Amino acid sequence: MLLLSIAWAAEATPLKQPSLFEKMMPFVFIFLLLYFLFIRPAQKKQKKHQTLIDQLKKGDSVITSSGILGIIYGLTDNFVILEVADNTRIRILRSQISSLVEPETGKLGLSLKEKNKK
């Protein structure tokens, strides 16, 4: 019985406290995961859209983010004038152009590579 009480009374070895670096590793890992899953793809998509907007020219067939199909009649710094029917023109923001449309086939989402090949 005496040995048992001595064993209980013995101090336990103290646990080593993790360093600040070890404490921060899960947060760094989560941030990197979120960056590569959400932030980076969104930045690439935004850059691609900005390139598309910068390369617009008169006569391009486009579709807007609201689904309006039209041909670019005129361009300014911030606005695009679309001809949506005979003698029917609307003015929209350049940023609302979502994609180019091939006029012959009506195919949506003409990529910049395909546009530059023509």
Image (cartoon, rainbow, N blue to C red):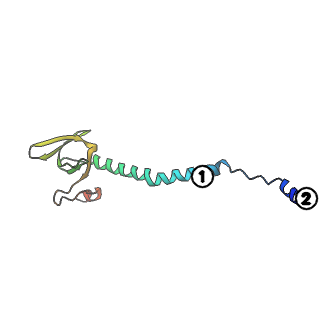
7 and 62: which one is in front?
7
Q: Which mark is residue 55?
A: none
How many numbered discs sit on the rendered protein?
A: 2
Secondary structure under tag 1 reads helix
Residue 25's tag is 1
Cβ atoms at labels 1 and 2 below 8 Å apart: no
**Relative image position of residue 90 (x, y in whole percent):** 17, 41
Q: Residues within 10 Å of mark 2 (few under 14, many from 20)?
A: few
Which residue occupies 29% across, 50% down? Answer: 52
Secondary structure of the residue carrying tag 2 is helix
Judge the density around disc 1: few (<14), some (14-19), many (≥20) Cα neighbours within 10 Å: few
**Quadrant (top left, top right, bottom left, bottom right) of the N terminus:** bottom right
Residue at left offset 23%, top offset 57%:
108
Q: Hey, what amino acid is under mark 1?
A: Met
Is residue 100 rendered to the left or right of residue 26?
left
Closer to the camera, 5 or 86? Answer: 5
Say which residue appears at 29% left-offset and 58% top-offset: 113
Tag 2 residue: 2
Which percent across, then down, holds residue 17?
Answer: 71, 50
Residue 114 appears left or right of 9: left
Give percent across and percent down for residue 67: 22, 49
Q: Residue furthest left?
A: 86
